[in-house]
Amino acid sequence: MADPSRWREEIFRHLDGIVTAPTAFALHRRGVLAHLREQGEADLADLARRFGANEGYLNVALRVLASQGWLDYRLDLARDTVSCRLNAASPAAFDRVPLYADAVDLLALTERYHPRHFEVEPFRAMEALFERLAGRYRLPTDAGPVAEQILRHIEGLIVGPTAVHLGMGGMFHKYFMEASFRPEEFHRDPDSFTRLLEIFARLGWFEARNGTFRFTEKGLFLAQRASAYGVTVSYIPTLRKLDDLIFGDPMVLRRVAEGAPEQHVDREMNVWGSGGAHASYFRRVDDIVIELFNRPIAEQPRGILDLGCGNGAFLEHVYEVIERQTLRGKMLADYPLFLVGVDFNPAALKVARRNLVQADIWAKVIWGDIGRPDLLAEGLRADYRIDLADLLNVRTFLDHNRPWREPSEPLGRPSRSTGAFASAGRRLSNAAVEASLTEHLRRWAPYLRRFGLLTIELHTLPPELAAAHLGATPVTAYDATHGYSDQYIVEVEVFQQAARAAGLEPDVRRLARFPDSELATVAIHYLQAR
C-alpha cells in the first residue's frame, strides 16, 4: 500500500545519517563523547581547549547531535556561551556510534574514485556494508528507537550517494521508470550493476524478475525525488575531512589554486541537486512575477537579475511564465526582457549558459559577488547601459552563502538565532551573524526601491524542535553541511527581523513557508525598500 509520508520520512532520516555518522564518529574517535559521558555536561569553550578543537566547527558538530536528540544544547544568547548536557538518549546513542565505522570508512575509500562512476572496489565495500546492515549489526529487534535511528542513518550513507549517482547518470529517465529494463541496457558492468539493483530491490525500490527490473511505487516516489539527496551528498568531500576541520587545519579544503575546482563541495552535483529540489518552490513565485509583468509597460521592470543563478533553471522558469501568462509576454518584440544570470562560481555559470542556450532563451550570464551590489551595478551600467534598480532582483538560496564580512557595528541586543556559525573554524557569535546579515541587506536596499527583491531562502530550526520531529525535516543535514562550509542560515523570523532593520519590508501577503508550520526550513519573501 502506498505510503508517501513514510517514504518522505525515509529521505529525511537518510539525510540525517549522511551528516550525523561522520560527525558523531569524529567526536567518538577523538574522545569527546567519552569525556561528555564522564562529565555529564560541558562548556563549548572548555571542550575546544581540552581537545585542541576549532571551536566553530566543534559547535556545529555538537548542535548536529542535539538536533538528533542525543544532547541538550544550551545557547546563552545574552552571555554568548554554549554548553551541552547529556540526556536520556545519550548513553544509547554514544554506545552505538562505533557502528558507523564501516560507513565512515566507505566515505574515505570513495575519495580515491570518480564521484559519479560505479567502480568495482567501492561497490564491493558498499555491498559488504549493506549485508551488515541487512543483518542489523546483530542488534536485537527490540534494541530501541536510537538503534533504529542509527541503522537508518547507515542506510542513508548507502542510498543517498547511490541515488544521486543513478539520477545524474540518467537512470531515472522516463524510459527506465515506465517499463522493465535489463542491467546491461544501462551499465557496461552488468554483473556488478545487477547486484547493485538487487540491493535496491531489497530496499523496496525495484521488483526483480527473470533478470529484469521494474520500479515499484515506492521506487518511483523516491527516484522522482533523488535530487533531494543531491545537495547533502555534494558536501561529502567536506564530511570526509571532519577530523581535520574540527580538530586540525580548518582551511584544509579552502586552499585552492586560482582556477582550480572547489574542494569542499562537488559543485556540479550541488547544482543538479539544487535545480531539482528547488523546482517545487518556483511555482509559488509565479503570482508575484505575473502581477509585476501585467502592469502598464512603464511600470514594469526592464527585466530580471537572478543572482546565484546556479543551473539557470529559475531564469528559464520565470521567462516561460512571463512569455505565456503576462501582458509583457505579448510585447516582447517591442519591449524585450533583459535577463541576467549572475553567479560567483565558474562551474555554475558554465551549466547555466548551456541550459539557457538549449532552452532558446537569450540571457547574459556573468560573474558577480552577492556582497558587492555596488560593483554589480557599475558593471551593468558600463557594459549594458542598464540600472540594477530597473530590474526585478531574484535569488534562490543565496544570502546565507555569502563570504563572511564582519559587521561594522554590534547588533546592540542578544540575537534570537539558535544557529551554530563559523568562519575558518572560528566560532561566530549569533549577534555578529545577525548584524552582518542586516548590513548585507542594507547594502542592497538602494537597488530595491522600485521593484524589490524576490528571494527563496534556506532557514534553520532550534535543535530541540528538530529533535522533537525526527523524520519530518531535513534541517540537521542543512545545518551540518552549511555550518561546516561557513554558511549562515538563520530562522525565518530572524531573517525577517534583519530585513526590517535594513529598511526592507517583507510583503506578508506574498510570504510562503515550506512546510507552512513551525518546521519551515524554506521561505519565499518579497522585500521592498521603504
Image (cartoon, rainbow, N blue to C red):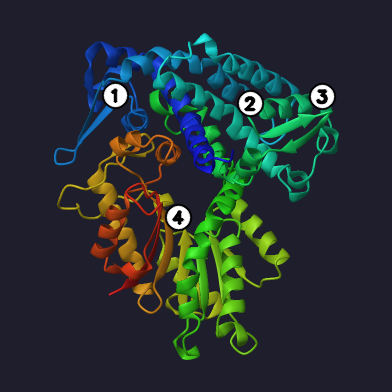
Front-lying residue, 216 or 47: 216
Q: Quadrant of residue 131?
A: top right
* Alpha carbon separation for disc pair 4 and 1: 30 Å
Q: Residue at x 49, y 11 (%)?
A: 139
Residue 238 pos. (x, y %) = 50, 33
**Label drawn at residue 151:** none
Report if residue 233 is visible in the image.
yes
Q: Which residue is mark 2?
A: 110
Q: Are marks 3 and 4 in contact (CB under 8 Å)?
A: no
Q: Which residue is mark 1?
A: 48
Q: Which residue is mark 4?
A: 398
Q: Label 1: state its secondary structure.
A: helix
Would you call the spot at circle 1 few (<14 residues within 10 Å), some (14-19), or many (20 or more)? some
Q: Residue at x 50, y 84 (%)?
A: 294
Q: Label 2: state its secondary structure.
A: helix
**Label drawn at residue 191:** 3
